[in-house]
Image (spheres, grey):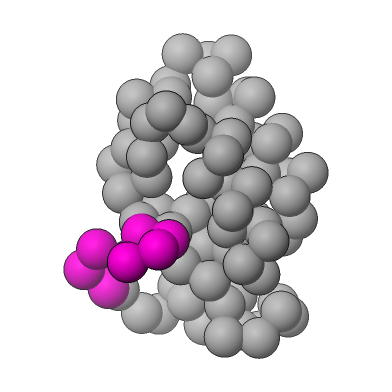
Amino acid sequence: VLLHSPRSALCAMRLIRQACLADAATRMEALAISRRVADAAVSALAPLRWRAVRVAARPNEDALLALLGRRREGGRVGE
């Protein structure tokens, strides 16, 4: 899931929960444009956890999209 703002993280999780798919999010990676967005994504899914949360190297679209080409084991915020 590509996340561009804290608000988009909250909106995405609201829609995922309304569709009764919150458990599915635990098998998804959240790709965030910044640490602030990553933190919002983690909070929005709590108490569940994303499979991984990755933050773009720079807060821009190119860096965010670059995450699509990389896979990492683990990758949760705080690890």
> Which of 39 and 69 lies nearest the eye of the viewer?
39
Q: Does the magenta stretch include residue 76?
A: yes
Picture coordinates of residue 68, whole percent (x, y): 45, 73
Is residue 25 shown above or below 64? Answer: above
Q: Give the range drawn in magenta.
A: 72-79
Q: Is the magenta stretch mostly helix, strand or loop?
A: loop
Say left or right for 48 vs 9: left
Say left or right for 51 vs 37: left
Task: Identify the residue shown where x is 38% and y is 45%.
Answer: 50
Q: Does the magenta stretch include residue 78?
A: yes
Say left or right for 56 vs 52: right
Which residue is at the far left?
A: 73
Q: Can residue 15 be seen from the camera position used here?
A: yes
Picture coordinates of residue 74, whole percent (x, y): 24, 63
Task: Identify the residue shown where x is 58% and y is 58%.
Answer: 38
Task: Identify the residue shown where x is 73% and y is 80%.
Answer: 60
Picture coordinates of residue 13, whole percent (x, y): 59, 31
